[in-house]
Amino acid sequence: MTTTRMEKSAVPRRPQLEQYDQHSKYNHRRTRMKKALLSALAMMLLTMSGASGIAKQRKTTQSNETQDAEFKALIDRYYDAWSKLSTDAPAEFYAKDADCVFFDVAPLKYTKGWEEYKAGVQRNFFDTATSAKLTPNDDLKVTRRGKVAWTTVTLHVSVKEKSGPDLNLECRHTAIWEKRGGKWLIVHEHLSAPLQG
């Protein structure tokens, strides 16, 4: 009888084994299904993030083109205003803060804001000229960071003097703009001309 007991305990019962096999197969299928679903989800997320990145890039490119067009129109209006031989015309483009600094071809700088700059340009250039034309070249570069932007462009300045030789210069212009009350205003600019040689 002891031998029979041992034999009975040593041999697994068939229903338990079948139950174990079915449970194991079920868990294995379930694990494979989870992996497949997770893989599909990961692929879907990657695809969506890639599409989102492409959409953002397109939106950024369109936004940059819109911003560049906005500043191109602004720069054209700015130079047209300076070509009128009156500092009243370009005044709308400048912040009126008393501590704004402007670097010019001559004199070297204005450090007391728009009012000083306006008076100096009127006295040194416009009062001695019969006409002026400032023409921007096609190399405008615009960089924006929120409510601040800076522009760089080269330009041709042509001034007919009341007496003496006419003035023709190729110049460089860098302006720092700040958006205030929905309008872009220059808070600093630097106008310079290369040495003639």
Image (cartoon, rainbow, N blue to C red):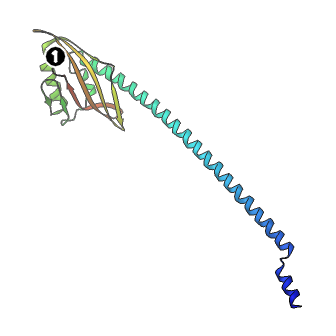
Whether residue 165 is situated above or below residue 145 in the rendered picture: above
Please identify the residue farthest to the left as the structure is shown. 164
Residue displayed at 86% across by 83% down: 7
Residue 77 falls in which quadrant of the image?
top left
From the viewer's perspective, tell me whether residue 165 is left or right of residue 152.
Answer: left
Quadrant of the rendering where the C terminus is positioned: top left
Say few, some or many: other residues with alpha carbon within 10 Å of mark 1 (under 14 / 14 to 19 / 20 or more).
Answer: many
Quadrant of the rendering where the N terminus is positioned: bottom right
From the viewer's perspective, tell me whether residue 7 is left or right of residue 75.
Answer: right
Residue displayed at 86% across by 73% down: 14
Residue displayed at 52% across by 36% down: 54
From the viewer's perspective, tell me whether residue 73 is left or right of residue 186.
Answer: right
Please identify the residue farthest to the front as the structure is shown. 3
Label 1 sits on residue: 126
| Secondary structure beneath label 1 | helix
Residue 145 falls in which quadrant of the image?
top left
Residue 36 location, x and y as percent? 68, 52
Q: Which amino acid is tagged 1?
A: Phe
Residue 187 location, x and y as percent? 25, 33
- Tag count in the figure? 1
Whether residue 62 is situated above or below residue 136 in the rendered picture: below
From the viewer's perspective, tell me whether residue 46 is left or right of residue 140.
Answer: right
Residue 19 location, x and y as percent? 82, 69
